[in-house]
Amino acid sequence: MTRSIWAARSSIALSLLIAVISAICGCSQSAPSTVTVTHTVFSTETITNTETEVSVTTIDNTVTQMITTTVYSPVTVTTTTTMNEQKDESIVYAKIGQEKLTIKLAENSSAEAFYDLLSKGDLTVDMHHYGNFEIVGDIGTTLPRNDTSITTEPGDVILYQGTSITIYYGTNSWSFTRLGKVHGLDQQQLKEKIGNSDVRVTFSLS
């Protein structure tokens, strides 16, 4: 095979590659986030093929998608698509105004049910101060209880009687179900974020 014939075949293969990538990605109107092209030629007197690999990666907050297409000369096309999505099922969030609290969930069926509830959509709870050590509000449904005798600490997130959620900024002793704990804040920081008035808190997975 002469080099001119090989060049013509390589050009055809590369054209096919571009068409395949456009069809796969639907990106004829907009460029992907990242495109990497590697061209390898096996240059001997008896050249049999040329290989071109194109990787297209799009990234958002949770999903990475990679499409790799390989075209050989004459023509062989292999397409592989993988999608990875990772979420930490032990973390939920509570938004109070512009403040966002990170809550590490406990390991019990109540916390699992709470996570499942939030997976269906954000939960907004009107919460009021009680006893100068907590804010509490009704969640509008009933979650399974795992009550034990607890002396709370600032940051504890508690399920009360299966129907109310509390965020503690002080201490109290009672039979409660532990849902989780606010991460990364001391008592003073937590009290500042909660404030002194009744608050509307939105619990979510993100």
Image: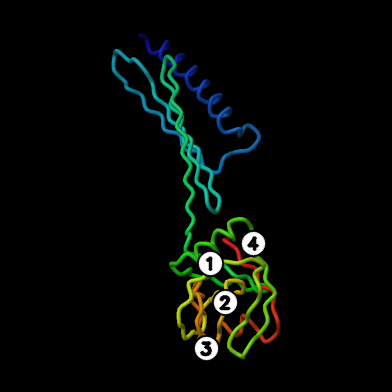
Which residue type does callout 1 highlight?
Pro
Q: Residue 123: give x, y in percent of width and height.
A: 65, 65
* Residue at horizontal 68 percent and vertical 82 percent from the top: 128
Please, is residue 18 above or below residue 1 in the view? below
Q: Residue 164: give x, y in percent of width and height.
A: 61, 74
Between the C-alphas of marks 3 and 2, the distance is 13 Å
Label 4: few (<14), some (14–19) or many (≥20) C-alpha neighbours in 10 Å: some
Disc on res. 144: 1
| Residue depth check, mark 4 versus mark 3: number of the one nearer the observer | 3
Please, is residue 55 above or below residue 169 in the view? above
According to the picture, the residue beneath numbered tag 2 turns out to be 160
Could you tell me which secondary element the residue under label 4 belongs to? loop
Which residue type does callout 2 highlight?
Tyr
Disc on res. 122: 4
Q: Are marks 3 and 2 in contact (CB under 8 Å)?
A: no
* Residue at horizontal 65 percent and vertical 76 percent from the top: 137
| Residue depth check, mark 1 versus mark 4: number of the one nearer the observer | 1
Which residue type does callout 4 highlight?
Asp
